[in-house]
Amino acid sequence: MQLHISPHDGVPIYLQIVNQVKYLVAASRLEPGEELPPIRTLAEQLLVNPNTVARAYRELELAGVVFKRRTAGTYVSGSASPLARRQRLKIISERVDALLAEARQMNINIEELMELIQERDETMQTTASIKEKGS
């Protein structure tokens, strides 16, 4: 499980972890029953306090995304995958909001941004198509 934390993001680190795990579940990159890394292991990987990871795991558990097996780890809940469409759209909306805010800070207008998004999408589709043919 690869997470990318930005201490300068303005979003608390535990929420970054929560949001990214929810995204990975929604995208089926984390399957039901799959074990999440132990708290200490993930904290070491992300260079954060273990309490931060523990808080994120608690939030995920309260949201029903994961469940804990006593002394056996934290696992992706079967009922959490796939997330409801509304939840997936909420996750994407948050990412779009962050992108729009960053674009505004860099004086990039919406037309340029949309053009860039379309170009990137075409590139990704072409790359995926090439990979499929090579398989």
Image (cartoon, rainbow, N blue to C red):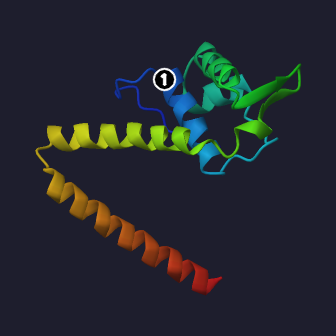
At 62% from the left edge and 25% from the top edge, which residue is drawn? 43
At 62% from the left edge and 16% from the top edge, which residue is drawn? 55
Quadrant hosting residue 134:
bottom right
Q: Position of residue 135 (x, y in %)?
A: 66, 82
In the rendered view of the protein, which quadrant contains the N terminus? top right
* Residue ranking furthest to the top: 51
Towards the viewer: 9 or 59: 59
Can residue 3 be seen by looking at this rendering?
A: no
Q: Is residue 19 above or below residue 123?
A: above
Q: Secondary structure at mark 1?
A: helix
Q: Position of residue 51 (x, y in %)?
A: 62, 13
Quadrant hosting residue 114:
bottom left
Q: Is residue 118 above or below residue 55?
A: below
Mark 1 is surrounded, within 10 Å at the Cα level, by few (under 14), some (14 to 19) or many (20 or more) other residues, namely many
Q: How many numbered circles does the render carry?
A: 1
Residue topped by disc 1: 13
Q: Position of residue 101 (x, y in %)?
A: 24, 37
* Residue ranking furthest to the bottom: 133
At 39% from the left edge and 40% from the top edge, which residue is drawn? 93
Image check: 105 left or right of 91?
left
Can residue 81 be seen by looking at this rendering?
A: yes
Q: Position of residue 85 (x, y in %)?
A: 56, 45
Name which residue type carries label 1. Ile
